[in-house]
Amino acid sequence: MKTYALFQEYIWLVNTIHKAEDGITLEEINRRWLQTEASEGVPIARSTFNRHRDAILDIFGIIIECNKKNGFRYYIDNSDVLEEDTIQNWMLSTMSVNSILSENKGVHNRIVLEPIPSDGENLHKFIDAMKRSVRIKVTYRKYGEEEQSERVVDPYFVKLANKRWYGIVHKPDDKGHIFVLGFDRVLSLELTTEKFRYPKGFDPIGFFRNSYGILSVQDTPVEKVTIRAFGKQVYYLRDLPLHPSQEEVATEDDYSDFELTLKPTPDFYTPLLSRGPLIKVLSPKWLADEIKRQHLEAAKLYEEYYRIQDLQNK
């Protein structure tokens, strides 16, 4: 069996077993498997199933156990790992979507996906440098600037955010300073022969734990932010929290208050501003003042534009 088809089978097994709340027998698994096009009418033999269990553990870290006391029903013993932000889960999620698409080719033109840039060459070089533990020389241009800058940095890890790839790097001559490079602003990236040591115990996921998005300014303190949501925004925030730390702390008939613990960097302003009058920042005051200022600046732009339009039309 080809590697891709094997992966599809692994994904199908994980999803099928995970959805079975009370566990599922191999007989029930095969009953569902034979209803798919991928099965080609051939059931999964027990020996094959056991090999798949081992492979799923090795690749995704997912443990499929058997409850012999409950009719030999299979279940995922560590289902909490399916909620973690790891490359394995990203692969699992991506291939789950691919599996759905391949099973529904007849309506493929009615399934619309957002494109994710590959940033192929630079991403490949960056990951290669991570594997070799060698520094990279990067030529970089910030948004809105003509001047280019060249740096030699330690490639720590990569992150996909908002449909863009980023490289998180450390500058050797700037003790402890870690910053983010957007691959779309990298003009050139080359591997050097200079080795670096990846810090023991460094946690890439933890690095962004208190961040809203891709910005993790090291000298920005973590703060408690309280926002008030009105109307439908209450339900949106309940279903799609702005941050993992979000908690609903007060509920009234016409609004709810939510508390978040994070670094309120400028990229956090966007989701607050985009909701207009349906979101109000209660604290900290400096953030409430900043959001208010930006709303007023936007209002001035509209007023000025239509004032000029009215004068031209007279």
Image: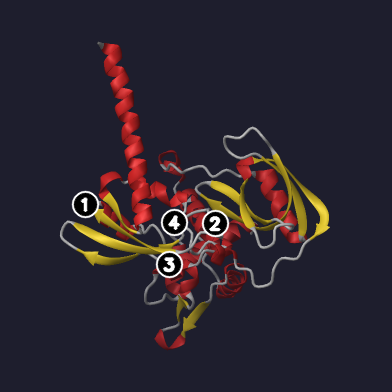
- What residue would you read off at disc 2? 217
Q: Which residue ends up furthest to the top in the rendered image?
A: 314
The picture places residue 73, in percent across and down from the top left corner, at 43, 79
Residue nearer the viewer, 10 or 186: 186
Q: Is residue 40 visible?
A: no
The earlier-in-sequence mark between 3 and 2 is: 3
Q: Report helix, strand or loop for mark 1.
A: loop
Decide: marks 3, 2 in contact (CB < 8 A)? no
Q: Report helix, strand or loop for mark 2.
A: loop
Residue at horizontal 57%, vertical 72%? Answer: 61
Q: Amino acid at mark 2?
A: Val
Q: Report helix, strand or loop for mark 3.
A: helix
Residue nearer the viewer, 230 or 285: 285
- What residue would you read off at disc 4? 264
The earlier-in-sequence mark between 2 and 1 is: 2
Q: Which mark is residue 31?
A: 3
On screen, residue 277 above or below 250: above
Q: CA distance from mark 2 to mark 1?
A: 33 Å
Answer with left or right where residue 155 lies relative to residue 304: right
Q: Report helix, strand or loop for mark 4.
A: loop
- What residue would you read off at disc 1? 231
The earlier-in-sequence mark between 3 and 1 is: 3
